[in-house]
Amino acid sequence: MAESLAELEPRLGGLPRHVGERLRAVRAALHERTLDVVRATMREQGRSLTGKQGRGLALGVRTAVDAFVAAVAEPTRPLADTRQVFHALGRTEYQEGHRVDALRSVLTVGARAIWAFLVAPERPDRLAADELYVIAAALFGYTDTLAGAAAEGYLDEQRDAAHDWIVVRRRLITLLVQPDPPADTALHSAAEAARWPLPATVAVISVDGSDDEHLARAVGGGAVATVIDDAVRIVLPDPDAPGRLAALRRALTGRRAALGPTVPVRQARASYRLSRRALRLHAAGALPADGVVDCDAHLLTLLTHWEPGLTDRLVARALAPLAPLGPAARRALAETLATWLDTQGQVVETARLLHTHPQTVRYRMRRLRERYGADLDDPDARLALHLALRHHLGRRP
């Protein structure tokens, strides 16, 4: 871990002296701006700066701003005291039951607030662009350092306080699937605390229910599980190991479940998000209901159903040329266009699949060309039409 800001950004030593002096001159304003943004972020988290941890965070913000301003002027100044403050804040985060990424988000928005203040175009004393680039590199490296100290504090408190290994493993899963990838040190510490050998790859499985401990034992293979957002999330290490997925499917027989893709362990959140969305689509009937849903086999459905309303918007735009027609004509032309696209423009094959005459298909395609024109020959437009028609006509990929 870096001992000073100079180690994080060596170019700081080459900045003119006036840079540090200007930052010192606006330190009070930086306090105010950063605290305002942090207060807003904590309100979004359902917290305030009035409680014990809130007062600690307010002190931490002031300490972080002061230390950064001082370190820009004196880059070799030690960061140990500031790191210790955030290590203690990380411990308190765990004690008060907050997620490990809550403090990181506070630090991130605080750094953005400082940067926005420094680059504001209306500032009469704004620094030169090359000076700002150096400060930006130092600022965001500094933020990562404090976040790492907070994560270490969080995990140290977790290790000291946790005697129940199941609870520790649950917190490990939270770290793996949080929005921001954990630092290597934090991830290794969490795995060590959970006595879970860190695998190269994982898959996250989402299962209806709340019997996480039972499912982890049933799946085996070093699987760990916890309940997140009213469903069990199982993290399966090295899913491609011989027999591991077969054992998983046996353990989940009769259960509604979705298997996320195999990913490197630091990308566990991607597998988690896909399996979470697939489980919801499974429940809604948009994915097959027999056995465990394999996300990799249904990526197109996941893509077109990812954001509610987005595909409906695509359908409305893509099929707008057919809107003036009556329902029967609209349906016939939509079916014809979808099948024509499926067969890559083969009229005879389209007619066979639609159980109609090739001349009928040709007539309908002339009508479609009158309405779509060159879009029927444009690859991007055809892709949008293909996706829209699949969704509109209820066809599975």
Image (spheres, grey):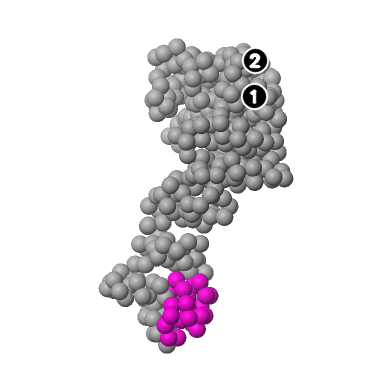
Q: Residue at x 44, y 21 (%)?
A: 35
Q: Is residue 285 above or below residue 151?
A: below
Quarter of the N terminus within the rendering: top right
Q: Of helix, strand and loop, which one carries label 2? A: helix
**Residue at 37% over, 75% down:** 333
Distance from Cα at disc 2 to Cα at disc 1: 28 Å
- Asked whether residue 263 is drawn in magenta, I would say no
Q: Amino acid at mark 2?
A: Ala
Binning the other alpha carbons within 10 Å of mark 1 as few (below 14), some (14 to 19) or many (20 upward) gives many
Contact? badges 2 and 1 (CB < 8 Å): no
The residue positioned 48% from the left and 69% from the top of the image is 382
Q: Quickly name the residue at label 2.
A: 80
- Could you say where residue 12 lies in the image, as x and y percent from the top left? 65, 27
Q: Is residue 222 above or below residue 166?
A: below
Across and down, in percent, residue 41 comes to 43, 27
Q: Secondary structure at mark 1?
A: loop
- Magenta stretch containing residue 340, yes or no? yes
Main SS, magenta region, reads helix
Say which quarter of the image contains residue 355.
bottom left
- At 59% from the left and 40% from the top, the residue drawn is 251
Is residue 367 at all visible to an observer of this figure? yes
Estimate how packed mark 2 is, as few (under 14), some (14 to 19) or many (20 or more) residues with alpha carbons within 10 Å.
few
User: What are the residue bounds of the magenta stretch?
Assistant: 337-358
**In-front residue for pair 15/274:** 274
Closer to the observer: label 2 or label 1? Answer: 1
| Mark 2 or mark 1: whose residue is earlier in sequence | 2
Amino acid bearing label 1: Ala
Q: Is residue 235 above or below residue 391?
A: above
Badge number at residue 372: none
Q: Quadrant of residue 9?
A: top right
Lateral position of residue 30 relative to residue 260, left or right: left
Label drawn at residue 194 = 1
